[in-house]
Image: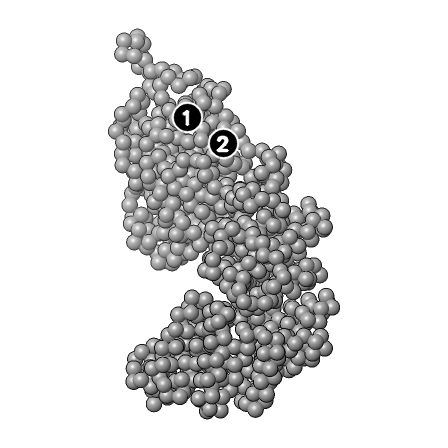
Amino acid sequence: MTPFSDSGVDPATAGTPEQYVALLRQLRDRSGLSFRTIERRAKANGHVLPASTLATMLNRPTLPRRDMVVTLLQACDVSEEQSTAWLTAWGRLAAARSARTIAAGQVTPEGTDRPATQPSGPHPPGQVPPGVPGTPSPRTADTAGPAQVTTTRPVPFQLPPMPAVVIGRSHEIEQILAAMTADRAICVLEGPGGIGKSTLALHLAHLAATRYPGGCLYVDLHGASAGLSPVQPTEVLARFLRALGARTIPPYVEEASALFRTLTATQGVLVVLDNAASAAQVRPLLPSGPGCTTLITSRWKLSDLDFTARFPVGPLSEDSAITLLRHLCGPQRLDADTEAAAVIVRQCGGLPLALRIVGARAAARPELALGAFADRIADEAGRLDELQVGDLSVRTSLYLGYRAFGEAARDDHRLAARTFRLAALPDWAEATAPGCAALIGAPLAATERALEHLVDANLLESAGPDRYRFHDTVRIFARERAQAVELPSEREAAMHRLTSALLSTSVAAIRLLYPHDQHHAGLVADPTDPQLTSRSTAWAWLEREHTSLLAIARQQFAAGQSLAEIRDLALTLTRFIEVAGYVAEQAQFGELTIETAQRLDDRGGVAMGLNILAIARLRQGRVDEGIDLLERRLVIQRELHDRAGEAACLNNLGNAYRDKGHFTEALRYLQESLAIRRELADHHKEGSTLDNIGLVYQHLGAYEQAIAHHEAGLALTRQVGDRHREALMLVNLAETLQLYGENARAAEHAREALAICQEFQHQRGIGLALRTLGDAYAELGLTSEAHEYRLQALALLENLDEEAYEKVRTAMAQAHT
């Protein structure tokens, strides 16, 4: 955006506030912008300047507030050099006005929003107090000689220039400005490096500057600055005291801090402590007088500091990030390639520093399309190399926070650094405390302390109790540090420990949910999560972790590591994945099991993988694919002389042919399976086969035979106490009874099934029970209840059982005809 030239309007010529306002009117006239356009531009820049307020300001003879002048200059695209001239003139006029109001016994400059304070101390606010070391004392009444006039000191204004633009922080600005109005307010802005804390703090300080008649003090405390150690409080106090007029600086921090509080006691001062390293560094620098405010920024949470308000500063939203990129690159360039802009914003993760670097590099290479920059930062391996320009570097910014741990002498800080490095290795959505304990090979309590250290330093985000999340850019940096510090063997060992721990916890969870399941037989259950104590906690753990379990299993498979554990993990989880209805994940686990078992030369494992994948295909309505996979499994089971596996495969083939409508073949396969299971005296699985035979008879219209088989299977299943399988058999029995015309009995069994399925959170079972209840209630004439049950069933079955979903849709359509 080309800065507006205000040549011919020289603010230095203004000798009075009225002349200054007249020059501002000329500036606005020369810009050609309407009041409404300036209002819209101010809003886009993160400011508030209503058109009515602007019109009033430009038609009053008094000096406007400084923040309103700044907003107008930015909205008119006045260059930085010219803006400095305008603000210098404003400061000169404001100082002259302050001297006049002090002489008149007033302390609040016109246009501020603090109430005037009557002089109540030993000296008028705005003047150097009598008795400060190195300052002359006023004459007493009986002193001979001419009267001595006490001169006023310049009001300090140490704020660096106001940021050119602040985007996407309107909500934070409103909240923090409100918090700053509290008496003796101490506001902490905390967040990771590069998130824009300092920019936001300076923006706020300039907006609120006219509230503070005693001036604005600023210091960069270098809590995280390249090549610089944190500034000592004594050095900061010396700077502040000199700015406040003290000629002698006490050598000890306690004395200097006390003098600082004395000088600011009635002044109404804004103190900005930027980039703080610790609460200990900050405490001596806090004013305590009424009307004083302290604004602190830090990468650390400063939990041991007493403050009035804390504001976490997070990444920009996608829309705000696009707006910032548009401002940095220009609207035409961004609009020419919106897809590339979206990639850049996504890869920068809403980090303002990263976006500013991309904007600066793009500005330096106007001949390159944004797509070129998007391609470069899309590659994780080189992203941090691309996110640096001049002295701006995302990598350096992150390292400044990490070095507090990586170069620390304390054992717990070094453990935090190792946790940071290794926790970034897995492809998990969220890190967990037990998982990190396995990674680093440390006790859980020590690991939790290390993780909290990292959260306090904003290197990790808290995602809930014992759960943590990396910002994408931080994860890349942490992996870089792991590559640089940890030996390959150490990284492999860490990932193997994690995979083994996750397998053990998964086995423990599945045993709590499905004690009759045989896939986990022989595996060790040593859960790393101490809260895994019941079916509900087991289900909750699997719900939280199943996506990460699949991602880590795929990651380890790609690395050729922990293959046996991956195979066992997939086999262990298959029942939960099927019951929960995660069909796409079920297919991925099946494929992973097949490939892993093939690498291990485990034919039995390949057969089980084929079964997992086949069931997923049947659930997806891809029946022919499912049958092909099951027939491949049957060949392997017979070659291995695995009679139990053969019976299970025959059972599933019978179900598949039933779904295809080939009932003769279905009965043949199921009866073969039943014979083998009776031969093996496997009454548990015999009950399942009997129930499945009942479904075939149901489709053939032989309802009495179907009911007899359902009831026989249900009796065997109840004998072994498998509640989960009992619920599915009750659903099948209820469906057959409903078709047979016994709707009251059907509804009774469906309600019983629904309760058990809800207990186990079996989504497909819940959907099937609701569907049967809907059909039964419709036949009983309870149309309103039937419609409600069918609506609920429709929502659950859409992605879990295509055939059942279509039956519900058809029934609802017929009910409305």
Camera-nearest residue between 225 and 323: 225
The residue sitting at 34% across, 90% down in the picture is: 817
Whether residue 596 can be seen here: yes
Mark 2, residues whose alpha carbon is within 10 Å: few (<14), some, or many (≥20)?
some
Q: Above or below — where is 255 with respect to 461?
A: above
The image position of residue 721, as x and y in percent, is 48, 68
Query: Nearer the viewer's eye, disc 1 or disc 2?
Result: 2
Residue type for callout 2: Gln
Residue drawn 51% across and 51% down?
530
Q: Residue 639: x and y, percent? A: 72, 77
User: Which residue lies at the image location 58% right of the left edge and 38% below the top edge?
Assistant: 412
The reply to whether residue 795 is visible in this rendering is no
Q: Earlier in the sequence, mark 1 or mark 2?
A: 1
Residue 755 vertical placement versus 808 (above, below):
above
**Label 1 close to label 2 by CB (< 8 Å):** no
**Quarter location, residue 637:** bottom right
Closer-to-camera residue (197/764):
764
Residue closer to the observer: 543 or 272: 543
Q: Can you give x and y, in whole percent of width and height, for residue 14 in the image?
A: 38, 40
Instruction: Provide the residue designation for mark 1.
Output: 260
Q: Position of residue 285 (x, y in %)?
A: 44, 30
Query: Callout 1, which amino acid?
Result: Phe
- The mark found on residue 281 in the picture is 2
